[in-house]
Amino acid sequence: MDKVVASAAEAVADIPDGASLAVGGFGLGGIPAVLIQALYEAGVTGLDVVSNNCGALDSGLAVLLSAGRIARVTGSYIGGNKEFARQYLSGEIELELIPQGTLAERLRAGGSGIPAFYTPAGVGTQVAEGGLPWRYDGRGGVAVASPAKEVREFGGTAYVLEHGITTDFALVRAAKGDRYGNLVFNKSARNFNPVAAMAGRITIAEVEELTEPGGIDPDQVHLPGIFVQRVVVLSPEQAADKKIENITVTPGPRAGQVGA
């Protein structure tokens, strides 16, 4: 029942080349940065990654991306990552781009044992009709395009069939966890971390604070420990190391103005 492992390196040691990974985080919020760095140091390559985005500012999955360790990405946002755009347009990486809500539900469905579901998101677009460029050929042409998906009507409304996602491993970050793997996420880190954790056959969670069993009120558990196989406890320095992609602040009062 005690799922705590000694280090991030030990936790990712059995992730092989070519493994599929569901990775939590939203932008740079709630990214499992320590586990990603450990995976980088292990030299794993050819990864098939499912994540909302692929990191930024040389942080998060951008560490693996810049090193050429990622072969394919299933995600919903690539804006702001110039290296991702370069690799994609040059045909170095494959990308399945899907609506953000669909991505979250595909992960949740896979983790819940639901093989597929219907959604109106994407009906009437290339998401449903096919033809989205998954991989370019490096010369401006499309080497691999998305296939058409099944569309059915329910109550007079068209819906597209989407398949649940499961992966070999999942990497997530939580604000708090116990030795049984029960997790609590902080604010926007709760967007994709829980569903990514559900989708992984082996889920590894890095936690900023470890509590003993019973230290988390059951009503406050965001993800039950049944979905988590390994827990890595971060040092205070690792827990505090959080990057900000775009800093937005309210300007102070101008000279002569009275502050509120």
Image: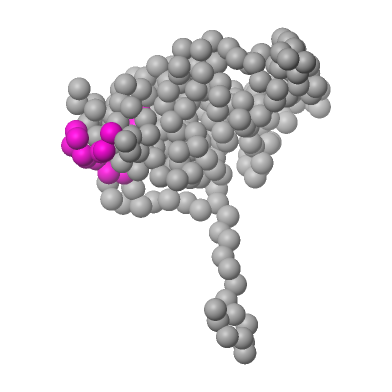
| Number of numbered callouts drawn | 0
Left or right: 230 as drawn, with respect to 115: left
Work out which residue is located at the far front of the displayed protein and give it.
155
Eyeballing the image, is 62 above or below 260? above
Q: Which quarter of the picture shows residue 164?
A: top right
Q: Residue at x 45, y 41 (%)?
A: 189
Taking the image as drawn, is residue 71 in sight?
no
Q: Residue at x 49, y 33 (%)?
A: 192
Residue situated in front as seen by the camera: 201 or 145:
201
Left or right: 76 as drawn, with respect to 227: right
Taking the image as drawn, is residue 181 in sight?
yes
Magenta range: 204-218
Residue 260 image point, x, y percent: 54, 78
Residue situated in front as seen by the camera: 121 or 37:
121
Q: Residue at x 43, y 31 (%)?
A: 194
Eyeballing the image, is 28 above or below 257? above
Q: Residue at x 63, y 42 (%)?
A: 81
Residue situated in front as seen by the camera: 200 or 211:
211
Eyeballing the image, is 95 above or below 155? below
Q: Quadrant of the N terminus?
A: top left
Q: Is residue 215 magenta?
A: yes
- In this picture the colour scheme is one colour
Q: Which quarter of the picture shows residue 146?
A: top right
Residue 73 image point, x, y percent: 59, 26
Residue 142 image point, x, y percent: 78, 20
Residue 171 image point, x, y percent: 41, 30
